[in-house]
Amino acid sequence: MVEQKKYLLFLGVPDSEFAKKTYGGYHNVFVSLLGDEGEQWDSYRVVDGEFPDEKDLEKYDGFVISGSSHDAFQDTDWILKLCDIIKKLDEMKKKVLGVCFGHQLIARVKGGKVGRARKGPELCLGNITILKDAVAPENYFGEEVPTSLRIIKCHQDEVLELPESAKLLACSSMYEVEMYSIEENFLCIQGHPEYNRDILIDILDRVLAGGHITEDFLKTSKATLENNEADRQFWQKICKNFLKG
């Protein structure tokens, strides 16, 4: 009998009403992208102080750190505790997929620099350039490495300086660091491979209602979705190949 694969998701964000109503929460949004039949996916709401026992980390085959509305350069208790867990997972050589906040936090832990995005926030469907020379054909991209990929962006911070051990995999006109890897155990993506257009539209409407963006910003952001979709299937392949390869 094949041993069941187990994965752990660190959630740095509470469920929105839309995510709960439509998908049953962000846990299910991630599992719909990354999960396969027969696997066990556990999640801990680290933003609320929920953490696994350190002794239980060994039983998982891979880990995912989600996005968050919090800044990865903050020193709040739960962020510092998550930093300690990342260090532990690094020592254990476990595979960790970092998304948005997770991408930034891993850079911080590994000696990079994170801060407010120099060209401002992004809430849109963005296009990133894949550095094909940095992505070996035998890597998790598969045989065909695209020159660019569309992905939903939702952040106001960025990785300002990569850790010395990191390899840059993608950039864009807005941000120097869109994607990077560290050895075989970290893959980090600034955008949201798990998001779709409906999730982005809900976020845009909520941040507008909260007074965080203008109507013009909203219109510009929603315009990026016209006749366009994120390359979600390709992102699914990349992320699964990394976590399960």
Image (spheres, helix red, strand yellow):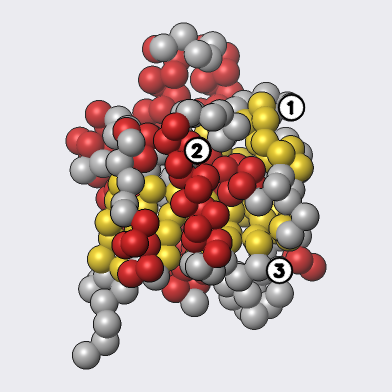
**Number of numbered discs visible in the structure rendering:** 3
Identify whether 56 is placed above or below 70: below
Identify whether 198 is placed above or below 194: above
Residue 171 lies left or right of residue 31; in this view the side is right
Identify whether 3 is placed above or below 74: below
Which secondary structure lies at badge 3? Answer: loop
Residue 37 lies left or right of residue 232; in this view the side is left
Q: Are marks 3 and 1 in contact (CB under 8 Å)?
A: no
Foreground of the two, 200 or 73: 73
Q: Is residue 57 visible?
A: yes
Among the two numbered marks 3 and 1 on one chain, the one whose residue lies closer to the N terminus: 1
Mark 1 = which residue?
118
On residue 88, the disc is none
Q: Amino acid at mark 2?
A: Leu
Identify whether 206 is placed above or below 63: above
Residue for point 50% across, 13% down: 212
On residue 135, the disc is 3
Q: Rate crowding at label 2 as few (under 14), some (14 to 19) or many (20 or more) other CA atoms within 10 Å.
A: some
Mark 2 = which residue?
80
Among the two numbered marks 2 and 1 on one chain, the one whose residue lies closer to the N terminus: 2
How far separated are the C-alphas under marks 2 and 3? 31 Å
Return the x and y of residue 101 as percentages of the image width and height.
53, 40
Foreground of the two, 58 or 128: 58
Return the x and y of residue 47 as percentages of the image width and height.
37, 34
Residue 77 lies left or right of residue 221; in this view the side is left
